[in-house]
Image (tube, rainbow, N blue to C red):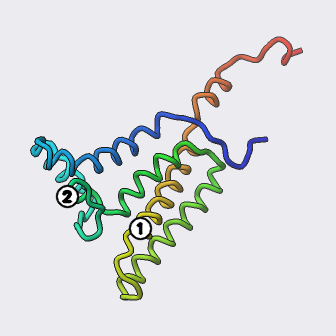
Amino acid sequence: MNPPLDLRWNAWSAAPLLLACAAIATPYLSTHGALLLGFALHRSFGLICHQRPERSFWFFGAPVAVCARCLGIYAGATLGTLMRTSRAIAMRIVIAAAAINVLDVVTELLRLHGNWMFVRFGLGLALGAASGVLISSAVPSLRDSESVRRPPSAEALG
């Protein structure tokens, strides 16, 4: 029987980690001599994020290339892809995290609260982690695929 939560390193963690690092590095690149690369990264992230400066963390005198929620999603996805659970549990966690994020957006649109950047980052972290768990739980791990391909031993047959 598998434990409810299993921690395993996998290559899926590299993509969101690289995205988070690139988003955080963009202000440094833009202000320390690599203006063209920083501009290119910033524009690329603009395809998936609104990039409003008042909703972004600032480093080196410039905003990170994504808003706080998107940065949280990338960081959370990095952590979430390290975990595995059943797909049913993972799906429930994703639905709950998405609902809480939608609730935050709606309550801010209704002016029930203001620009809570660290809350937005935390909610993004939860949504990213939940999504990462769902991805890693849906993809068979290397260990799982090796055990499927391995022929049964003589003891198991006898």
Name the residue rendered at 35%, 63% in the picture.
68
Q: For numbered disc 1, what is the local secondary structure?
A: helix
Q: Which residue is farthest front?
A: 60
- Type of the residue with mark 2: Ala
Residue nearest the observer in this picture, 70 or 99: 70
Please state the horizontal and vertical placement of residue 99, each as a whole percent of the image: 51, 72
Using the rendered view, name the quadrant where residue 18 is placed: top left
Please state the horizontal and vertical placement of residue 55, each as a whole percent of the image: 29, 69
Q: Which residue is farthest right?
A: 158
Q: For numbered disc 2, what is the local secondary structure?
A: strand
**Which of pointers 1 and 2 lies earlier in the amino acid sequence?**
2
- Packing grade of label 1 (10 A; few <14, some 14-19, many >=20) is some
- Type of the residue with mark 1: Phe
Residue nearest the observer in this picture, 67 or 25: 25
State which quarter of the image contains the C terminus. Answer: top right
Name the residue rendered at 29%, 50% in the picture.
24
Q: Which mark is residue 62?
A: 2
In the rendered structure, the answer to whether residue 86 lies left or right of residue 21 reads right
Please state the horizontal and vertical placement of residue 59, each as a whole percent of the image: 26, 55
State which quarter of the image contains the N terminus. Answer: top right
In the rendered structure, the answer to whether residue 52 lies left or right of residue 37 reads right
In the rendered structure, the answer to whether residue 119 lies left or right of residue 150 reads left
Seen in the picture, residue 141 relative to 88 is either above or below; the reply is: above
Q: Which residue is mark 1?
A: 118
Please state the horizontal and vertical placement of residue 34, each as a whole percent of the image: 12, 41
**Disc 1 versus disc 2: distance between alpha carbons?**
18 Å
Marks 1 and 2: CB-CB under 8 Å?
A: no
Name the residue rendered at 86%, 14% in the picture.
155
